[in-house]
Each structure stands twice: as structure tokens, then as C-alpha cells.
Image (cartoon, grey):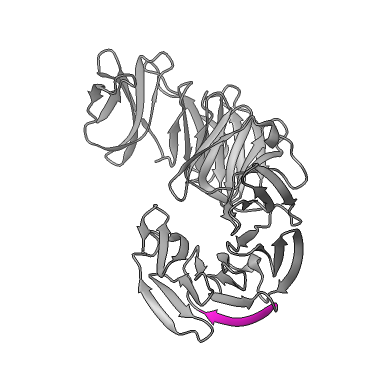
């Protein structure tokens, strides 16, 4: 059944039954708001139904052959896009005529299709070939064919006349200029839902893994200049220091030290690594120290004043490890690097730049590591438990956790006054 609501009153104004149908895949109004088109599955066949909004009756229906996957209706313009028989297909829909399909080009089945909000553009995304294609719905011309070296996320694609937005498999979302095909902006985020561009093209929104809906201003002049390393949007880390007037922020390799009373950035550290390389940062809350994980090296920095103190050379490369994390104790004396593959936790003595222990443990994907405030304990997430070890003797305490493989994982882990607190991806908190 299809239900239609009045957005002003919030009331359901009409509904249409869909007999023998197993669900609606996509739905759209006609531009004159007189008809509504829905694509459903009936008797294992893909069928389009067009209902009149005046009478509530189905005025037209037609089958879409070859079991297309996916299939999508445009928000405006009355277009249907589908991938079937390894081809990208496009047609207009109407209550008075049957569709006339145009083959736009070859396309792998189960790739992603997306329209611009005005219906003038349609795009396909193939995570297998790491390629995005954009066509004009008016001329059927292929306007852009973009190849990416970094793997792209399968179901995250948005576009309009000015911007093309895709997400990479390294927790970055790129905003590309449709005129130049160059990366204009970088959002340091991975979306659980979205991304979407507002109809006027000024805002970008998406729901992040922790459940928050984030909105970015695409017109901000501070974010429009594209340098050799690109400009990142969004803050990945904020940490206060013990003096209660200094905080550290991190955004895609750029570290800033702020004075809280004046809201002035006192010092800034620009990234020296290429934008494609992911950088992890951890800061000590009780000492003016932070650490930067770069591939095989960990750099130790002092914030008062900002200066490089030391570098630890690691055996394993971050680029060869699937998921990894970085933690530093509140007093700045111990540091830990964890990776789910090959499944290790490295514990370092910060002052002496010495690797104290390497623990071989089956860390969960997206692992979390935390030190107790005095650095006497370390905790890390396994697949269904949290393991706590006393240092330096490594006595083990296992804490059962409601972590289910492939369903949920802890985003943060921290010690607070004899308690261990974990926040899940779905914002569920365990103490």
C-alpha cells in the first residue's frame, strides 16, 4: 500500500492498495503533482504502477523486463533509470504512453544509480571498477567518466549541476567540481545514510556512524580553495588539556592548539603526508603531549610550545593493516597502537621511545584502546568482549560486552574513576 501525507498538517490524505505486490522499490510524483509512479515486484516481475492523485485509481501499469537491479525514479522530470542485461537504461514515464528505453552504455548489474534533484542528470557508481559515470537525461550524453585509485563506497553517491559527492573506503567523502572534475572539498566522515545535497546546492548532509546528522556548508569561502593537499571539512578529534584553557583539534592531519577563553588558534601543525594517507592522532589530557600515527612511524609532539619531540619507528605498516587505532595515557607516559590485522597491540614507553610489549590479540574491526588515568591498565575491544590488562605484569581481566559480530561495535572506550565506559556505534552506552 502507498500512503500520501500532507506535510503541513501531518495527516495521511490518501492511500492506494498494491494488490499481489511484495514491496515498493522506488516512488515519485509527476512534476504537475497529478500522478504518482511506483515500482514494485509482483509475481517475481518488476512492475510500474501509475495512479491518479485525483481519483486514486491506477491509470497505467507496465512491466519492466529483464529483472533490473537497481531501478530508480527521478525526483523530478519523470525519469526511470535501471541496470539490466549489463547495460544502463533510461526512459521517461507517463500515464498515457509506454516507456521507450535508451541504452546509455555498458554497466555492471547491482551497481548504484542516482539522479540529481532536478532530474537533469543521472549517475552510476561501480565500486568494482572504481568508476563513476554521469549522463544528461535530456541529451543522453555521457558528460563525465571518473576513475578513482582508492576504493569507493558502494552506496554513497549524490550529485547536482555543480557537485558530485562520493565516499572513499578510507573514511573520506570527496566533493568534486562538476565543471573541472577536480576535488574541491573533503569531508572527514563515513556516512551510514546519505550523502544528500540540498536542492539549491548549498548544503551537504549525511548521517555519520555514531548516528548524528551532520550538515556542511558547500558555499563556505574558507573551504573553496583547493590546495595540493586539499581542504578538509569536519573535526575528527577534540581534546582538552589539564590547564582547562587549552584544547587540541584534529581535522584530516591538521592539528590546531586553541585558547578557550579567547577562541584563538595559538599554533597550527599542517600535515606533511599526502591526503590519501590516513592520519591518526591521540592527545594526553593530563600532559601537553600528543601523538601522530603515520604509516610505520609514530611522532610525539609537545604543545607548550609546539615542537616535535621524538619518533618511534614501527615494524608494521598501517597501509597493510585493515583497521588500526592509537591511544596515549592521560599522563603522556604510555602509548598504544592497535591493528585488527595482524591482530596486535603495541605498548610503548613514550619518554624512552621503547617498545615495551607486543600483544597478539584478536582485536575487533574498528578497534578501541584506552589507558587508565595513571597508565596502570590498558583496555581494548575484542570481538565479543573487552580485555583489560594490568601493566607492566599484563594480568588479564575479561569484561563481557554486548558486542555482536557484524552488528555493533564500540566507537569510544575510556576509564573514569574505576569504571570503564564504552559508547557503541548506535549511541548505546555501557559502563
Q: Is residue 367 above or below residue 237?
A: below
Which quadrant of the rendered structure holds the C terminus? bottom left
Is residue 109 left or right of 430 when viewed as pictured? right
The chief SS type of the magenta part is strand
Using the image as rendered, state which of residue 331 and residue 6 is in the foreground: 331
Magenta stretch containing residue 278, yes or no? Answer: no
Q: Which region is colored magenta?
A: 353-360
Is residue 124 left or right of 428 when viewed as pictured? right
* Residue 233 visible here: yes
- The x, y position of residue 221, in whole percent, is 69, 31
Q: Is residue 428 above or below residue 3?
A: below
* Residue 169 visible here: no
Which quadrant of the rendered structure holds the N terminus? top left
Q: Quadrant of residue 223?
A: top right
Using the image as rendered, state which of residue 239 and residue 167 is in the foreground: 239
At horizontal 72% and vertical 74% (from top left) the residue drawn is 313
At horizontal 54% and vertical 36% (from top left) the residue drawn is 158
Residue extending farthest to the bottom is: 393
Using the image as rendered, state which of residue 262 and residue 45 is in the foreground: 262
- The x, y position of residue 213, in whole percent, is 46, 40
- The x, y position of residue 255, in whole percent, is 68, 53
Magenta stretch containing residue 355, yes or no? Answer: yes
At horizontal 35% and vertical 17% (from top left) the residue drawn is 35
Is residue 236 left or right of 427 when viewed as pictured? right
- The x, y position of residue 367, in whole percent, is 50, 66
Q: Is residue 69 above or below residue 334?
A: above
Amino acid at each position: 500500500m502507498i500512503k500520501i501525507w500532507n506535510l503541513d498538517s501531518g495527516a495521511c490524505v490518501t492511500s492506494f492498495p498494491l494488490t499481489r505486490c511484495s514491496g515498493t522499490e522506488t516512488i515519485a510524483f509527476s512534476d504537475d503533482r497529478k500522478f504518482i509512479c511506483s515500482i514494485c515486484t509482483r509475481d517475481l516481475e518488476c512492475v510500474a504502477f501509475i495512479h491518479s492523485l485525483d481519483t486514486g485509481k491506477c491509470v497505467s501499469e507496465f512491466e519492466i523486463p529483464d529483472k533490473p537491479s537497481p531501478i530508480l525514479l527521478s525526483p523530478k522530470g519523470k525519469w526511470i533509470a535501471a541496470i539490466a542485461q549489463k547495460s544502463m537504461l533510461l526512459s521517461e514515464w507517463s500515464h498515457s504512453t509506454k516507456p521507450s528505453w535508451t541504452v546509455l552504455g555498458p554497466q555492471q548489474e547491482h551497481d548504484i544509480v542516482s539522479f540529481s534533484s532536478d532530474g537533469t542528470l543521472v549517475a552510476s557508481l561501480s565500486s568494482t571498477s572504481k568508476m563513476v559515470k554521469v549522463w544528461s537525461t535530456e541529451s543522453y550524453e555521457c558528460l563525465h567518466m571518473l576513475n578513482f585509485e582508492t576504493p569507493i563506497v558502494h552506496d554513497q553517491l549524490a550529485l547536482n549541476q555543480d557537485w558530485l559527492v562520493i565516499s572513499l573506503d578510507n573514511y573520506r567523502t570527496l566533493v568534486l567540481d562538476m565543471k573541472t572534475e577536480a576535488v574541491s572539498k573533503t569531508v572527514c566522515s563515513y556516512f551510514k545514510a546519505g550523502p544528500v545535497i540540498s536542492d539549491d546546492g548549498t548544503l551537504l548532509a549525511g548521517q555519520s556512524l555514531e548516528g548524528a546528522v551532520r550538515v556542511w556548508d558547500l558555499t563556505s569561502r574558507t573551504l573553496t580553495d583547493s590546495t595540493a593537499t586539499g581542504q578538509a571539512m569536519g573535526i575528527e578529534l577534540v581534546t582538552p588539556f589539564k590547564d582547562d584553557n587549552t584544547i587540541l583539534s584534529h581535522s584530516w592531519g591538521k592539528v590546531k592548539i586553541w585558547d578557550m577563553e579567547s577562541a584563538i588558534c595559538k599554533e597550527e601543525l599542517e600535515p606533511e603526508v599526502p591526503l590519501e594517507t590516513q592520519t591518526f592522532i591521540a592527545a594526553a589530557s593530563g600532559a601537553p603531549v600528543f601523538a601522530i600515527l603515520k604509516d610505520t612511524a609514530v611522532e610525539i609532539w609537545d604543545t607548550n610550545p609546539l615542537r616535535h619531540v621524538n619518533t618511534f619507528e614501527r615494524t608494521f605498516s598501517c597501509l597493510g593493516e585493515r583497521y588500526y587505532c592509537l591511544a596515549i595515557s592521560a599522563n603522556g607516559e604510555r602509548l598504544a597502537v592497535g591493528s585488527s590485522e595482524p591482530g596486535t597491540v603495541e605498548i610503548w614507553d613514550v619518554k624512552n621511545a621503547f617498545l615495551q610489549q607486543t600483544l597478539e590479540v584478536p582485536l575487533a574491526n574498528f578497534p578501541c584502546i584506552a589507558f587508565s588515568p595513571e597508565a596502570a591498565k590498558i583496555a581494548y575491544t575484542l570481538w565479543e568482549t573487552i580485555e583489560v590488562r594490568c601493566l607492566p605484569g599484563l594480568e588479564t581481566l575479561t569484561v563481557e560486552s554486548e558486542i555482536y559480530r557484524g552488528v555493533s561495535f564500540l566507537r569510544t572506550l575510556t576509564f573514569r574513576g574505576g569504571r570503564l565506559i564504552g559508547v557503541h556505534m548506535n549511541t548505546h552506552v555501557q559502563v
